[in-house]
Image (tube, rainbow, N blue to C red):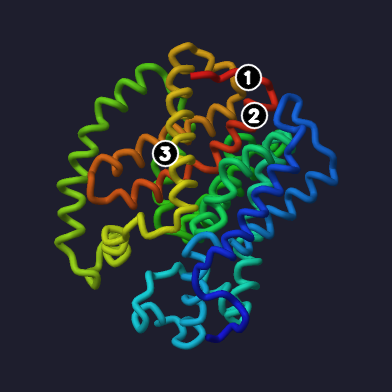
Amino acid sequence: MILLNLPTSFTPILTLFNVLIILLLFVLFVGSYRYPFKMTVNKRFIIRTLIFIFFIFSFFDGDWYHYYEGISAMKLYGRNFELLTGYESIELPFWFIAKFVNYNYILFRIIVWGAIFTLVFKTQKRLELDKNTFLISFVFISMLLLSYSRVSLSMALAFYGYSFIVKPKTNSKLRSYIFGLLFIISSLFFHKSAIILLITLPLSLLEIRKKTIFVAFIFFPILIYVIKTIGLEYVMSKSIDDKSIINIKTAHFYLNEDIMQRGIAMYIANFLFYSVCYSIFLIIIRHIFSEKYYNLPKYIQNYQNVIFWIILFSSVFLFTGTIQVFFYRLLNFSIIPISIFISYLLSNKINYNL
């Protein structure tokens, strides 16, 4: 291997390292689980440091080792490593980052996941969310899922940019809109699944009314049929070398990927996250009908709308039966908005029961 003294495969001992960090975080949160969720500055600093360490050394998931091997292959074979090794195609910005750090995997993770960490907390600061409740919601909902996949950088870029669209600076709205759009557009270059944002972000700027929900659920089975028949048939009729408006090679990779090959820790984490997603989805629908939705600040409404549309569109793939990998990859884009939404509810003592 090119990099020495780094683990190349999953072991229970390495997972224990991540479990210990999570347990330590839970201990640090003791006394802060109830309103007003008080924490000292030092405690917040320690929690953020542990989150950062967890991001860099997320041994619990296979992607940590997969990326390590991929960067080693880049060092050996250059830009064509995908063709020569059979790895999933990787976006160009990540190749430039790997080259910049001379293919040092730890430095690569520090830059990529350091950027994710920075953007997430800059988003919290821009939206003026309570620091304590955001840390709680982030650790319980987002930390695990943001720590293992490179798509997390695409998410962090997009929702940081989105904060400038829905909450622009009062003295420079045009500049905020331009700045926000640049971040959102840049997110599309960091992962192919970010294309869902081209649909969900524009829709999220519109109010969701009762009529909107009825129309969405009427079209839901139609979308399932279109994706399952026309979309799937189109992808399967193409070879991986065919030129197309979508990346056929990546589509085939997703279709053949077995989501059950992940470790038990990620299986449990995903199950818990999906439970949270659909609970939030039902809460949003319930409160639109009760009109409590309209009592929220406009920018929180917008992030709530993003959650609604992402869950709705990703669920289309859940019911296709054969392409459920698309489901969880798209659903994961709701991670950051959900943390934002829950943080706001907790800090404002809003009771959003089902």
Q: Residue furthest top?
A: 290
Q: Nearer the viewer, residue 180 or 142?
A: 142
Give the residue drawn at x 80%, y 49%. 45
- Residue located at (66% from left, 60% from top): 114
320 vs 37, left or right, is: left
Please say if the residues under marks 3 and 2 sit with CB atoms less than 8 Å apart: no
The residue at which mark 2 appears reads as 344
Q: Nearer the viewer, residue 15 or 33?
A: 15
Numbered disc 3: secondary structure: helix
Q: Are marks 3 and 1 in contact (CB under 8 Å)?
A: no
**Marks 3 and 2, how far apart at CA:** 19 Å
Residue 234: x and y in percent read: 17, 56
Identity, as a three-letter code, of the amino acid under mark 3: Ile
Which amino acid is tagged 2?
A: Tyr
Location of residue 313 (image quadrant): top left
Image disc number at residue 310 = 3
Q: Rounded to the nearest whole Å, what is the CA distance between mark 2 and mark 1?
A: 8 Å
Is residue 261 found left or right of 297 in the rendered image?
left
Precedes in sequence: disc 3 or disc 1: 3
Q: Does residue 325 show up?
A: yes
* Mark nearer the N terminus (3 vs 2): 3
Crowdedness near tag 2: few (<14), some (14–19) or many (≥20) residues, C-alpha within 10 Å = many
